[in-house]
Image (spheres, rainbow, N blue to C red):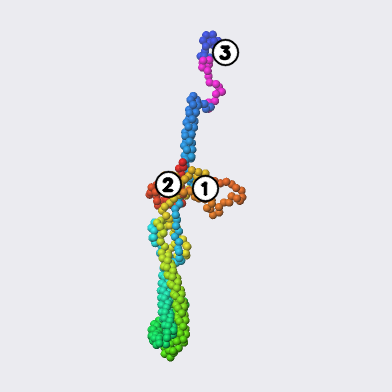
Amino acid sequence: MESTNSTNQVQDLDGQKPAVLDRDISSPQPATDQRPNEPKVPRQHPYRKWILLGALGVGVIAGSIVGYRWWRFAATHAETDDAYVTADVHPINARINGTVVKVAVNDNQQVQQGELLVKLDPQDYEVALQQSKASLEASQQQARVAQANIGVTVTNAQGLTTQAQGNIDAAAASVSTSQAALAEAQAGVPAAKAQLAQVKANLVKADLDYNRYTTLFKEGAVAQQQLDAARATYESTRGQYDAIAEQIKQAQARVVQAQTNLNNAQAKLGSTQGNLQQANASGQQTEVNRRQYQAALATVDQSIAQFKNAQLQLNYTSLTAPLVGRIGNRTVQVGQRVQPGQTLMSLVQPIPWITANFKETQLGKMQPGQAVEIKLDAFPDRVFRGRVDSLSPASGAKFALLPPDNATGNFTKIVQRIPVKIIFDADSIKGYETRITPGMSVVATVETP
């Protein structure tokens, strides 16, 4: 068996190659150490490197364009998100104390100028107004009485002066004219009696007024000042009455003296000179009465001021809207007792603006009148327009309750914020007037040259 196999292999070598040997030589077999689970390396594209370089170049160009545009935008625009909507908020304060009887508005309600907001109980102030009115009428009446006293005193003084001067002329005249002086003295008696009757009527009126004020004072209806004024008027009128009665007696005595002393002109002259001094004294009383009248007028002015103040206090019981706006922060209720200066509610004006706090490094080219693009967080899809109205005269830190003092401690430089007032364009906020409220957050972009 073994020899046969060896012969067959030799024959194959001498003649034709065996098929097995031929397959082994012409078709190389896989290596015996190859791993069946080893991943195949992907075949790289020959242009992959150039594609990556091209994409990188396009990205650099696009980034450059975007960066240039951003640089151009930043160079001509100043933007901040430290901005808020602001409006005038007017506190509605009570000017007097009182009890609330009516609250005429609700929160968020639109009101017009002069519209009633709160009503206080007016009864106490109505009584005070009536009292001041009565006091004014009383003081006016006292002024009229003082004015009348001036007229009476002036008339008496003029009469006494005329009489004294006539007696002097009569005494200086000759004995032949003494009869005429006697007739003149007799004529003075009826005039004095007429004056006495007039003063007597005033005395009766003054007595009635004094008694009436005494009764009212006991009842507590009038003040002590009014009772004293009535007493002074009565005593003054009584003194005038006694003075005129005395003048009548003196006039009658002068008639008797003229009849008995016609030949003694010197004595008559001395007597008439005394009467002239009495007339001068009456003139001084007239000046006193004028001063009393001026004091009465001052009392009238004081009463008028008190009356007007009572009217104002009564008017303050009705709190009205000072201007057009919307009500907010209403804290008052019916039945509440309020005090002067207490805030009852707030009135917000429907004219908002924006306070934007820009960095001081952004203000180099910012000027009033420049256009502003406004974006509110409440309306992200809406762009509003406005303009710069003004720049604050100081930084926000300077207006703080406790401004920083860089002269103390270690210094650290901080970029300051400057408030800038921005006004909405009227056409830009049409339809949003009642929706834009103070406190809303804003992003403001100012177009600077």
Mark before the other along the chain sequence, 3 or 1:
3
Identify which amino acid the numbered label 1 is placed on.
Arg
Chief secondary structure of the magenta portion: loop
- In the rendered image, which residue does mark 2 sit on? 386
Nearer to the camera, 414 or 331:
414
- In the rendered image, which residue does mark 1 sit on? 417
Q: Tell me the SS state at disc 2.
A: strand
User: Label 1: how many residues lie within 10 Å, few (<14), some (14-19) or many (20+)?
Assistant: some
Q: Tell me the SS state at disc 3.
A: helix
Mark before the other along the chain sequence, 1 or 2:
2
Q: Position of residue 341 (x, y in %)?
A: 47, 62
**Is residue 32 shown in magenta?**
yes
**Is residue 400 shown in magenta?**
no
On the picture, is 348 further left or further right than 2?
Answer: left
Q: Tell me the SS state at disc 1.
A: strand
* Residue extending farthest top: 14
Identify which amino acid the numbered label 2 is placed on.
Gly
Mark before the other along the chain sequence, 2 or 3:
3
Q: Nearer the viewer, mark 3 or mark 1?
A: 1
Q: Kindly report the distance in space between the C-alpha atoms of the residues bearing marks 3 and 1.
A: 110 Å
User: Label 2: how many residues lie within 10 Å, few (<14), some (14-19) or many (20+)?
Assistant: many
The magenta region covers 23-37
Q: Nearer the viewer, mark 2 or mark 3?
A: 2
- In the rendered image, which residue does mark 3 sit on? 2
Nearer to the camera, 329 or 386:
386
Q: Is residue 86 visible?
A: yes
Identify which amino acid the numbered label 3 is placed on.
Glu
**Quadrant location, the N terminus:** top right
Q: Kindly report the distance in space between the C-alpha atoms of the residues bearing marks 1 and 2.
A: 20 Å
Q: Position of residue 135 (x, y in %)?
A: 43, 73
Q: Kindly report the distance in space between the C-alpha atoms of the residues bearing marks 2 and 3.
A: 113 Å
Residue at x-position 47% and y-position 31% = 58
